Image (spheres, rainbow, N blue to C red):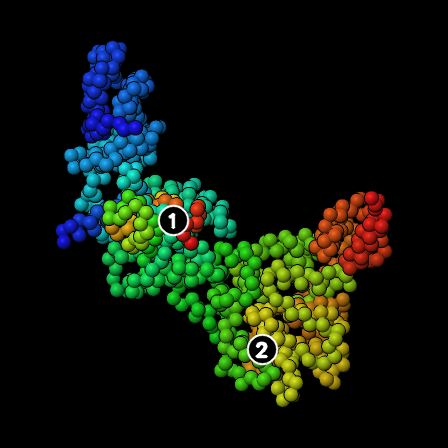
């Protein structure tokens, strides 16, 4: 179906509403419409109406009655548009666009710019501005046709310092960009509009969604400055693991870079970085755990290669949002988080064949596992240890969110079965930190500190082995049952061997006698467990923080029983559909448990026995 | 030379318009060539990188409908994957490769 275009073009090009109305009226009369609509008096009343909503209404009803003439319907509908509330305008413009498709516009130089303004009106750009649709088109068409000389000069004068997108390219951290863009964006959209973004912090997917919504708002504002901000925000959604997310960023960013006047220094800084961005779009960093800003940082590998003795206490968090919430393996491919050279080459002698496992450590920046989601970890442990919440808080006291995991030496003291060893294991799991368990009960000498390099079966110290096994600089060394170690001292003794590791001063310059190398093991955490700390020599006990883990009481039974049930179902799939313990069962369990002295191990056995008894008496079919 | 300059100016104007949040008017989109079964690819040009789009084109002024083409460097990509602008012209994005029909790998 084709529509006549002559009237439509004339109307779109009319400079004022009344002139447009006149054109449509004449065409309507000429087409021989029904008598009621040929009434000149009606038209005179229409153009003289002071209440625009009434005149619009009259035009709309005219459009309804003229359904036989499509082009006139379009024109009358156009007259009925309220620029403050342009309902129906997008559809009208689409119809007009289709109708005039393929025409030669040289005869109507005003058509396209006017059309563009009307499209902006449809998008609500001129809400609040005085005048009819046609008036707005006349006022703004020049801006659409050709940017005024002033604005063009303004665009050219924008150097790298003024472009948020180029400034964003220079940042090394995702969070820095976020902070940098916040204030200028606030100036345009207001604080309330940015609140959802703050609320979404921590959830990468949600944050991306909110940023996309913000980008739409910024583009709707429709100035070069907000468009520039929008591009900068879009850069925050680029994820090296999804090269497709770079699509709406890279072409415009490269164009911006190529068309901005830059001095040599800016060129030298920006070009290598955008190079990395393109590589990311090609999929070069598809397995990366860090943000593109980290990857584009030219010194991202050297940042943390400090001398071993003075570890920067103010470690920076790995900036990537995603890495926080995925189970990052303890061995990232690239040491991009905080790292520490545990075994500097210049302080080491040549390793012999027994030490093959330690060769990768020499002069290597070992990653430091960073503490994440401490609040969640605390809540989890509180739920698992309802009887020892104070102890849990004491254990977690040294940890800081976003900083490497390192705990002051501590000893967990409690009766058998209070869950000490399990607490250390769970702590390691939740912190994603390697736990090296050393059984003190089996130690009759000073083997903990390793054996001399002179022996043919020489063995490095336990902390050195923990570092080599975990390939991180801050594993946890757990000395289980430290009070069970042999007390005799003729072949050395565990307690004496332990002492040098527990002082930060000596542990940052510990010389392993087997490797014959100086090592910085100051970031390792030593946690010992004991049933009774009174046997420990005073010098050793002084170096430990003593954390008492109490036994649970009958009051904790429901919570603990539920946890034991959960443990049992994970161990044994056939238990997955077992009913929860009934109150009479709990009652019996509670009495049996009280007789067994409230040990967690005993509780597990009792519950297991209860479930087995239940199975035996279950009705069979 | 002046023609080159005019094309360059037109390009600058359009990019500025997109930066201000504008999109091509329906008419422009109707007249623009459309690329179906498209794949966006990063290509190296010397030291620099460019984004190009490969696919089957229709309504291209210099190509037969259905011809497989590779565009020149993309300078603006619409964030909703509706259109893109190369140095030379505006394209409308049609069907993405591998989503429906699977004509192209």
From the image, state whether disc 1 or disc 2 is nearer to you. 1
Assign the N terminus of chain A to one quadrant of the image: top left
Q: Is residue A339 among the parts visible in the rendering?
A: yes
Residue linked to disc 1:
B37
**Side (left or right) of A427 relative to A612:** left
The residue depicted at 60 percent of the width and 61 percent of the height is: A431
Q: Are marks 1 and 2 on the same chain?
A: no
The answer to the question of whether label 1 and label 2 lie on touching residues, with beta carbons closer than 8 A, is: no
Of A458 and A499, which appears nearest the observer? A458
Q: Quadrant of residue A218?
A: top left
- Secondary structure of the residue carrying numbered label 2: helix
Horizontal side, residue A363 vs residue A270: left or right: right
Where does label 2 land, which residue? A357
Q: Tell me what residue is drawn at x 49 percent, y 65 percent.
A: A337
| Residue A588 at x, y percent in the picture | 84, 49
In the figure, A485 relative to A277: above or below? Answer: below
Where in the figure is residue A92, as x and y percent of width and height?
31, 29
Judged from the image, the secondary structure of the residue bearing numbered disc 1 is: strand
Where residue A8 appears, as percent x and y from the top left, is 23, 27
Q: Image check: A579 left or right of A264?
A: right
Give the answer, above or below, for where A363 lies relative to A150: below
- What's the chain of the residue with tag 2? A
Q: Position of residue A134 (x, y in %)?
A: 23, 28
């Amino acid at each position: 179906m084709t529509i006549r275009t002559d009237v439509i073009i004339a109307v779109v090009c009319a400079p004022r509403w009344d002139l447009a109305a006149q054109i449509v009226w004449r065409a309507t009369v000429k087409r021989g419409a029904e008598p009621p609509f040929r009434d000149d008096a009606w038209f005179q009343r229409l153009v003289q109406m002071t209440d625009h909503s009434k005149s619009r209404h009259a035009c709309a009803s005219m459009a309804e009655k003229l359904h036989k003439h499509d082009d006139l319907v379009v024109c009358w509908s156009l007259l009925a548009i309220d620029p403050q509330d342009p309902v129906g305008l997008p559809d009208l413009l689409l119809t007009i666009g289709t109708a005039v498709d393929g025409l030669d516009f040289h005869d109507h130089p005003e058509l396209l710019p006017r059309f563009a303004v009307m499209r902006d009106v449809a998008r609500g750009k001129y809400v609040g501005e005085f005048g009819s649709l046609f008036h707005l088109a006349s006022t703004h068409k020049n801006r659409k046709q050709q940017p005024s000389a002033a604005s063009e000069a303004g665009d050219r004068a924008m150097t790298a310092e003024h472009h948020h997108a180029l400034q964003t390219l220079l940042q090394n951290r995702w969070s820095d960009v976020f902070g940098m863009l916040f204030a200028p964006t606030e100036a345009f959209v207001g604080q309330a509009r940015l609140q959802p973004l703050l609320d979404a912090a921590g959830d990468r997917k949600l944050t991306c969604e909110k940023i996309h919504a913000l980008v739409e708002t910024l583009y709707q504002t429709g100035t070069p400055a907000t468009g520039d901000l929008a591009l900068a925000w879009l850069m925050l959604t680029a994820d090296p693991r999804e090269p497709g997310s770079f699509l709406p960023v890279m072409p415009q960013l490269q164009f911006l870079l190529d068309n901005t006047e830059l001095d040599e220094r800016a060129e030298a800084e920006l070009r290598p970085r955008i190079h990395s961005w393109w590589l990311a779009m090609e999929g070069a960093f598809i397995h990366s755990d860090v943000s593109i800003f980290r990857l584009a940082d030219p010194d991202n590998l050297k940042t943390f290669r400090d001398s071993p003795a003075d570890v920067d206490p103010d470690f920076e968090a790995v900036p990537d949002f995603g890495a926080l919430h995925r189970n990052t393996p303890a061995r990232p491919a690239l040491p991009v988080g905080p790292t520490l050279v545990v075994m500097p080459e210049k302080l080491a002698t040549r390793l012999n064949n027994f030490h093959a496992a330690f060769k990768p450590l020499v002069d290597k920046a070992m990653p430091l596992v960073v503490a994440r989601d401490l609040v969640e970890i605390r809540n989890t442990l509180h739920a698992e240890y309802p009887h020892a919440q104070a102890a849990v808080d004491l254990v977690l006291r040294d940890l800081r969110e976003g900083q490497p995991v390192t705990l002051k030496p501590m000893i967990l003291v409690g009766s058998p079965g209070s869950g000490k060893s399990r607490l250390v294991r769970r702590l390691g799991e939740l912190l994603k930190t390697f736990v090296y368990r050393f059984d003190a009960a089996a130690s009759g000498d000073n083997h903990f500190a390793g054996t001399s390099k002179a022996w043919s079966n020489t063995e490095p110290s336990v902390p050195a082995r923990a570092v080599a096994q975990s390939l991180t600089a801050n594993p946890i060394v757990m000395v289980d049952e430290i009070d069970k170690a042999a007390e005799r001292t003729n072949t050395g003794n565990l307690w004496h061997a332990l002492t040098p590791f527990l002082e930060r001063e000596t542990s940052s310059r510990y010389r392993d006698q087997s490797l014959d190398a100086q090592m910085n093991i100051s970031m390792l955490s030593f946690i010992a467990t004991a049933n009774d700390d009174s046997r420990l020599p005073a010098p050793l006990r002084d170096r430990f923080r003593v954390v008492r883990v109490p036994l649970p009481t009958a009051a904790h039974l429901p919570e603990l029983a539920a946890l034991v049930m959960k443990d049992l179902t994970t161990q044994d799939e056939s238990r997955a559909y077992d009913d929860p313990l009934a109150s009479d069962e709990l009652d019996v369990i509670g009495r049996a448990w009280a007789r067994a002295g409230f040990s967690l191990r005993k509780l597990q056995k009792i519950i297991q026995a209860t479930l087995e008894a239940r199975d035996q008496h279950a009705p069979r079919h | 030379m002046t023609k080159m300059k005019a094309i360059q100016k037109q390009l600058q104007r359009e990019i500025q318009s997109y930066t201000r949040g504008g999109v091509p008017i329906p008419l422009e989109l109707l007249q623009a060539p459309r690329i179906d079964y498209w794949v966006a690819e990063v290509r190296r040009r010397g030291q620099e990188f460019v984004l190009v789009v490969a696919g089957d084109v229709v309504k291209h002024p210099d190509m037969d409908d259905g011809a497989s083409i590779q565009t020149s460097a993309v300078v603006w990509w619409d964030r909703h994957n509706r259109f893109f602008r190369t140095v030379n012209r505006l394209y409308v994005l049609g069907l993405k490769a591998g989503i429906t029909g699977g004509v192209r790998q």
